[in-house]
Amino acid sequence: MWRICVLLLGVGLLAGCASSRSPEQVAVLGKYVADLRERMNELQEEVAELTAHREVAACRLPNQVGADRISVGFPISPERIPASGNVNVAVLFVDFQEAPALQGGTATADKQTLTHEIFVHLVSGAERHLEAMSYGTFDVTFRPLHRWLRMPHSLSALYADSDSNLGNAISRSMLIDDAIGLADPDFNFEDIDSVVVIATPEADSIRRGSALLSPDWHFYPDGQTIGNAISLGSSDGRFPDRLTIAHELGHNLGLPDLYDTSVKLDSEGNLSDEADRFAGVFGLMADSSSNSPTEMFAWSRWQLGWLRDTQVACVTTFPTSVQLTPLAIPGGIKAVVVPLTETTALVVESRRILGYDSLLRKEGALVYKIDTSVHSGKGPIVVGSVSKPPDDSALLGPGEAWNSDGYSVTVKEVTPEGDLVEITAP
């Protein structure tokens, strides 16, 4: 704080001296004053961030599932890809002897055109979604190698999906490792943070997307270590959903699955609605179908640093009222967090029919519980009751309330600027 006082004194002295100077000197002093004011504003922001960091300490619940494992706790492992600045992701396309790209086609130009179509369909949407979720702080660059890499082994024998999680991870690891080896002579991996391998649509035994993460898996192209990778394919000749890569890249960033991963795929390679019993349609990491993109939970954005501490209200005294601004737009308070235990908390955020929530049929305040001791895919975030997969009916409108274990969240007022919510405790 003393640094701000010194700067204020300096600004005042310089302004006072300006009247006795020549026009040239006044101009120079004016520039100094402007620079000092800018620096003063920066210092004020730093002080606000430091103050907020202390104020939200009780709500920054620690990861209780293992420091090197993805969870809803703090901090995210440094082995995951950075959540700010520029991140580079290699994109490789693979086909197989028994499942060649464009079966019957031989023209190289046609095959390259197909990789461009797949890239636009899958990757462009993922890039836009993640940059929007970060309010522009995450700049991901996908670097494709636009040619088909013919895998050296049989699809059915080595790379196809497995019924077991471990078997599937092993087959995907071999797929990614072989693809990197084939691409390495023509592709520079030196500044690559993650690798995406996309199988031809003809490879219908590779269905869903999968993320491989260190410390369990590593890849070593160009003398460096890459500990984050993604593989995906499609069935029945259809491209995978356009948000599959965004979801799997969420794992590379350190976010867990928020749908029930114990639910098995049906014969068509799809999950039933039962998989959505924890968090329903809310959030990129929650909606297993990913057919209708929605905004990412405020809690997940806070984990990634896409929400600053100054945008989180950590509530420990009651009753308390907080004005929330809609999650889809930058600025303002984005989350109310009420710590319950060392590993659990309530979170409230404002969801409006804006941005990636534009397909919601209702808008309002969303209340959910987080538990940092629960593993990925087991329900670390729960909206409403797990007995019914939550949809947008879980959103609270004017005068509506959420009650559980003596805690209550009531929407007191709704305006274009957001929701005024009141929290009470037992």
Image: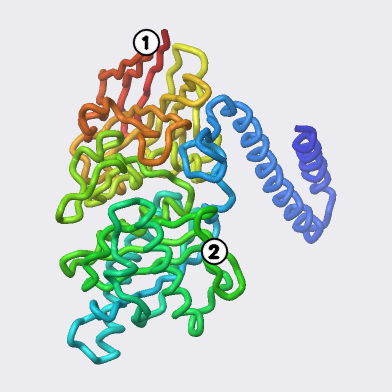
Disc 1 to disc 2, C-alpha distance: 47 Å
Residue 226 is marked as: 2
Q: Secondary structure at mark 1?
A: loop
- Image coords of residue 4 (percent x, y): 75, 37
Relative horizontal placement of residue 52, taking residue 161 as reference (left or right): right
The one of 277 and 417 positioned closer to us in this rendering: 277
Q: Most extreme residue toward the top, as rendered?
A: 426
Mark 1 crowdedness (10 Å alpha carbons): few <14, some 14-19, many ≥20 = few
Q: In percent of the image, x 50 and y 32: which residue is there?
A: 312
Relative horizontal placement of residue 84, taking residue 22 as reference (left or right): left
Q: How is the image coloured?
A: rainbow
- Image coords of residue 144 (percent x, y): 41, 75
Looking at the image, tell me whether mark 1 or mark 2 is earlier in sequence order: 2
Q: Hey, which quadrant is residue 330 in on the image?
A: top left
Q: Hey, which quadrant is residue 84 in on the image?
A: bottom right
Q: Secondary structure at mark 2?
A: loop
Question: In the picture, which quadrant includes the C terminus?
Answer: top left
Question: In the picture, which quadrant includes the N terminus?
Answer: top right
Q: In percent of the image, x 24 and y 78: which residue is there?
A: 98
The one of 166 and 140 positioned closer to us in this rendering: 166
Q: Which residue is mark 1?
A: 406
Q: On screen, 325 above or below 412? A: below
The one of 220 and 312 positioned closer to us in this rendering: 220
Q: In percent of the image, x 34 and y 27: which residue is there?
A: 367
Q: Hey, which quadrant is residue 104 in on the image?
A: bottom left
Q: How many marks?
A: 2
Q: In percent of the image, x 25 and y 25: which residue is there?
A: 397
Give the amino acid at mark 1.
Gly
